[in-house]
Amino acid sequence: MKVVKTIQEVRNQVSIWRKEGLSIGFVPTMGYLHEGHQSLIRKSAEQNDRTVVSVFVNPIQFGPNEDLEAYPRDLERDKAAVEEAGGDLIFNPEPSEMYPNHFTSFIDTTETTELLCGAVRPIHFRGVCTVVGKLFNIVLPDRAYFGQKDAQQLATIRRFVRDLNFPVEVIACPIVRESDGLAKSSRNTYLNPAERQAAVILSKSLNLGREAIEQGERDAKKVIAVITASLQSEPLARIDYVEVVDFENIQRVERIAGETLVAIAVYIGKTRLIDNFVITL
């Protein structure tokens, strides 16, 4: 398992694999890998001959008051995690490698980025789509793997891949959770013990919303009310949003039908956590 720092090194390796007739899977990450990331790498290793994992904390998706400098980084830990999960190559570039002087070209999206995290992080998805598009053009994978925890990101990447005719199949993978239900996230490391215990309210509240739908509730506002009331029962939780949207377009719905995303963002202390579920009726 190899680590490379430059675009040319990635292209050289990919060219060798292509000449050998091998298929290539790709898992883009910002590093500090956990079991959720490893589940994506394992799925790629199952479905492809070779798997590339990028480890890059992408500066252009962070706003001015967000946690770019504090974001956890540990390449040695990540190398061990990628190797254990079956990855073959890590691409770990410097920001200057990805964004040379006078970089002025971006992939911007609309509709899928208007609500949820896009409403409060206005530059975030432009940064995500731009770096993922660049990585697709560098790695040229057959398939790329994304976790459902970042559901709005998943929907947005699917959209720009379709709209801009990127020749890559986007594979969605389920959320990986801790034993108490908390969705795995690199940001969980920011939580102190009391906050970590309080954070379980996210999955508990979503489960109540899912139960309401499974018992026949179709009114989105009523499902939102059930989830909101549960979240408000936790003193350390501060709600950013609770939304029910169409999963393809990320637009609000009044009635739950088809493929629907129920998504929340909640501050536990100073740490902003997201979680969701998708239900198809």
Image (tube, helix red, strand yellow):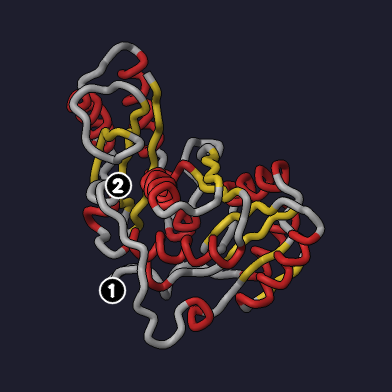
Report the front residue among 190 and 257: 257
Residue drawn at the location 38% of the way across and 32% of the way down: 204
Identify whether 120 is placed above or below 40.
below
Residue drawn at the location 72% of the way across and 66% of the way down: 15
| Secondary structure of the residue carrying numbered label 2 | loop
Report the front residue among 128 and 201: 128
Residue 236 seen in this snapshot: no
Report the front residue among 203 and 166: 166
Residue type of the residue flagged with mark 1:
Pro
Residue under pointer 2: 112
The N terminus, quarter of image: bottom right
Sequence-wise, which precedes: disc 1 or disc 2?
A: 1
Residue under pointer 1: 64
- Label 1, label 2: how many angstroms apart (C-alpha)? 23 Å
Identify whether 218 is placed above or below 65.
above
How many marks do you count on the picture? 2
Residue type of the residue flagged with mark 2:
Thr
Circles 1 and 2, Cβ within 8 Å, touching? The answer is: no
Residue drawn at the location 24% of the way across and 38% of the way down: 251
- Residue 220 is situated, as x and y percent measured from the top left of the image, at 22, 26
Residue furthest bottom as drawn: 101
Q: Quadrant of residue 53?
A: bottom right
Residue 163 seen in this snapshot: yes
| Secondary structure of the residue carrying numbered label 1 | loop
- Residue 160 is situated, as x and y percent measured from the top left of the image, at 39, 52
- Residue 203 is situated, as x and y percent measured from the top left of the image, at 40, 35
Report the front residue among 90 and 21: 21
Identify whether 72 is placed above or below 24.
below
Residue drawn at the location 34% of the way across and 78% of the way down: 104
Q: Dot 1, how many residues are within 10 Å of its Cα: few (below 14), some (14-19), or many (20+)?
A: few
The C terminus, quarter of image: top left
Q: Dot 2, how many residues are within 10 Å of its Cα: few (below 14), some (14-19), or many (20+)?
A: many
